[in-house]
Amino acid sequence: MGVLDHFPDLFDCSNGGSKLKKRKQLQTVEIKVKMDCDGCERRVKKAVEAMKGVKQVDVERKANKVTVVGYVEPAKVVARVAHRTGKKAELWPYVPYDVVAHPYAPGVYDRKAPAGYVRNVEDTQISQLARASSTEVRYTTAFSDENPTACAIM
């Protein structure tokens, strides 16, 4: 791509009524929806399959998880499931257990999570567990056996 290819983007003389729509990206959307029976599973699947742009729908009733693959927006899929089924729907809040540094930290561990998953939380307080502050390091090394100038209280 040359420099001249970027000029139409910089100098747009249209009125904003562009006829060309930007094509949506192929996405995988994972949703958490409580499903108790085959009827619930069928209703959720039908609601999502009827959406424009959906290519594939996988439902895991035991994990309360719906995976949608297609040219869709995540917010629209969640809204569609909630509206059509009357059930509470949210984006999949869990990540595999191996990804999280501290899976049993408060706010990360969730008893309701499926086996092998923990809640995906980006919290500064949880990340503080991995790093000790300078005052903590000073106090712990003051009584360490590896420190030759350490205080020995017996």
Image (cartoon, helix red, strand yellow):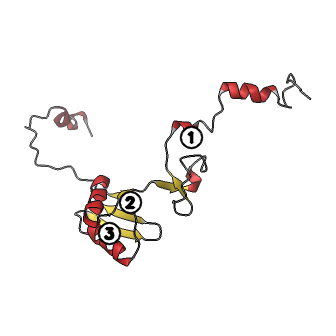
Residue lying at 29% horizontally and 60% vertically, measured from the top left: 82
Residue lying at 30% horizontally and 67% vertically, measured from the top left: 55
Disc 2 or 1, which lies upstream in sequence?
2
Residue lying at 66% horizontally and 32% vertically, measured from the top left: 132
Between the residue at mark 2 and the residue at mark 1, the CA separation in whole angstroms equals: 25 Å
**As rendered, which of 4 and 17 lies closer to the eye?**
17
Q: Mark number for residue 126?
A: 1
Q: Quadrant of residue 49?
A: bottom left
Is 145 left, or right, of 78 in this rendering?
Answer: right
Q: Mark number for residue 44?
A: 3
Q: Amino acid at mark 1?
A: Ile
Between the residue at mark 2 and the residue at mark 3, the CA separation in whole angstroms equals: 11 Å
Is label 1 in contact with label 3 (beta carbons under 8 Å)? Answer: no
Is 55 left, or right, of 136 in this rendering?
Answer: left
Q: Amino acid at mark 3?
A: Val
**As rendered, which of 54 and 41 lies closer to the eye?**
41
Between the residue at mark 1 and the residue at mark 3, the CA separation in whole angstroms equals: 35 Å
Q: Which residue is mark 2?
A: 31
Disc 1 or 3, which lies upstream in sequence?
3
Q: Quadrant of residue 12?
A: top left
Is 118 left, or right, of 17 in this rendering?
Answer: right
**In what quadrant of the picture does the N terminus appear?**
top left
